[in-house]
Amino acid sequence: MQKAGVTSMSGELDLATLLANLKPSLDEQPYVFMSIPIDDSNFIPDFPIKGLFREREGYTCIIEQEVADDQGFDYSELFCCLTCEVHSSLNAVGLTAALSTTLATHNISANVVAGFYHDHIFIPQADAKRALALLNQY
């Protein structure tokens, strides 16, 4: 039985179709990655977040630079988020490799986060527009 409002797995699997329909978009809002060392398994941030992942060492939070500044958090780098607008399946094979290889060839760091519907690539702010142009070539 499926809970109301819960979507089951779907999305495109074919790599050629994914790349042909990639349609990357750039969110120029600066984001930061930070780690919050917390042992509480029920941790819920009391500030807006873009992404949250629990690791042994603590919680990795992806938040807007403005939020980090307001909260007094330290960070060392700014990133922009490229979103691949194609609805990719979490079981698709090769998409992350294709995108990261393209960016690596041009010496651009890629921090990929797979969401339920889309893949999001956090790019150093200085490289974001160049990365967008490269991924628009698919």
Image (cartoon, rainbow, N blue to C red):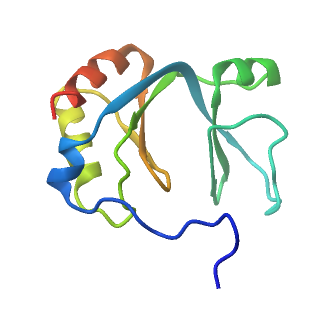
Nearest to the observer: residue 41 or residue 50 = 50
Q: Nearer the viewer, residue 129 or 78?
A: 129
Query: Most extreme residue toward the bottom, as rendered?
Result: 1
Instruction: Classify the position of the C terminus by image quarter.
Output: top left
Viewport quadrant of the N terminus: bottom right
Residue 78 vs 15, above or below: the answer is above
Q: Residue 25: x percent and y percent?
A: 38, 28
With respect to residue 30, does 114 lie above or below? below
Q: Is residue 41 left or right of residue 100?
A: right
Rendered position, 4 above or below 122: below
> Which sits in the foreground, 100 or 25?
25
Question: Is residue 50 toward the left or the right of residue 138 in the image?
Answer: right
Picture coordinates of residue 104, whole percent (x, y)? 22, 34
| Left or right of residue 91, residue 79 in this image | right
Q: Position of residue 72 (x, y in %)?
A: 80, 22
Which residue occupies 43% across, 47% down? 118
How many numbered circles does the render carry?
0
Say which residue appears at 74% left-offset and 18% top-offset: 69
